[in-house]
Image: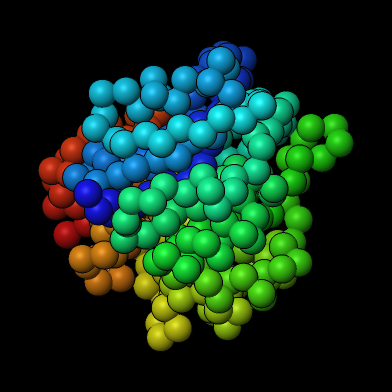
Amino acid sequence: MKFDTIIIGQVCLDTNTDYDGRTEHRFGGAVLYSGHAANSIGKKVAVVPKGNPKETDAEKAFGGSGITVFPKSSKNSTLMENVYFTADRERRRSRCLAVIDPYTPQDIPEEPTNVYHLAGLCYGDIGPDVILECARRGDVAMDIQCMLRHVEPDQTLKLHDWPEKTEYLKYIRFLKTDAAEAEVLTGLTDREAAARQMYEWGAKEIVITHNTEVIAYDGDRIYRAPLKPRNLSGRTGRGDTTFAGYITERQNSSIQEALTFSAALVSLKMETPGPFLGSRQDVLDYINQFYR
């Protein structure tokens, strides 16, 4: 079987405290939101979650979905603690209480895929050796958070620039950042200017998410699509869902078509907590209702 995407990243254990004081424990991680989103819209998906199997049951996180799971063992699982200060979840404090052993080239499945999606959570999860191995095999998509988000000595998370960016961005077909990450990486507050700078450094298509829209740049023009959620109860996983939708739709669609589809997908996802578990038809209906 050839997959549309193989997603390399850990399922983590999240402890989330909302702005009203309610606390919940759930599976989290970019691979979880990305994997379920791509699978739900009809793509062939494999995931490569890494963690301590006694702490994190990766099979359970994807159980019954039809997603192919290639679990990898690690001494620790990634443990995250999130405290949200506002109803829209735009302001939060995050701490990382434990991290996985880094991925290695040997962790990458031999099965063919259209794109390798690098979806680590913190700096050190995925190193240059994995980038190079994936690029040797095919197209690479990367969420830049795994190169910028560092675990500080007090376990808080802070964004730092990626010193090796100009050396390795040239191996990336699809690059995703949010507005804050784009500023840290480029020093530019203007998202369009930041996208152009990342293209100059070698990434082929840049996707930047924001709470109002998502933009893409391919070296020719800026494309954009608005976000239109009717509520924000499912805000967590917004960027992961957007990127998974974009890079899989992009394989058979134009940039604008893929961008609009992914914007509608994430808008619908944000109305319900947890990963997107709807259908492709749900997204198409949403587009017809709100994007025509």
Above/below status of 69 relative to 160: above
Above/below status of 185 relative to 166: above
Residue 144 occupies quadrant: bottom right
Above/below status of 183 relative to 111: below
Residue 14 % position (x, y): 57, 24
Task: Count all numbered tags in the image, as a single digit.
Answer: 0
Residue 86 occupies quadrant: top right
Residue drawn at (22%, 57%), measured in percent from left and top? 291
Residue reaching furthest to the right: 153
The reply to whether residue 20 is in sight is no
Residue 105 % position (x, y): 55, 53
Above/below status of 41 relative to 93: below
The reply to whether residue 147 is in sight is yes
Residue drawn at (26%, 23%), measured in percent from left and top? 64
Q: Quadrant of the C terminus?
A: bottom left
Seen in the image, is 220 located left or right of residue 162?
left
How did the renderer colour the structure?
rainbow
Residue drawn at (22%, 67%), measured in percent from left and top? 253
Residue 127 % position (x, y): 65, 55
Seen in the image, is 46 located left or right of residue 170?
left
Residue 248 % position (x, y): 30, 56
Seen in the image, is 150 located left or right of residue 231?
right
Most foreground residue, 4 or 148 = 4
Residue drawn at (58%, 83%), measured in percent from left and top? 200
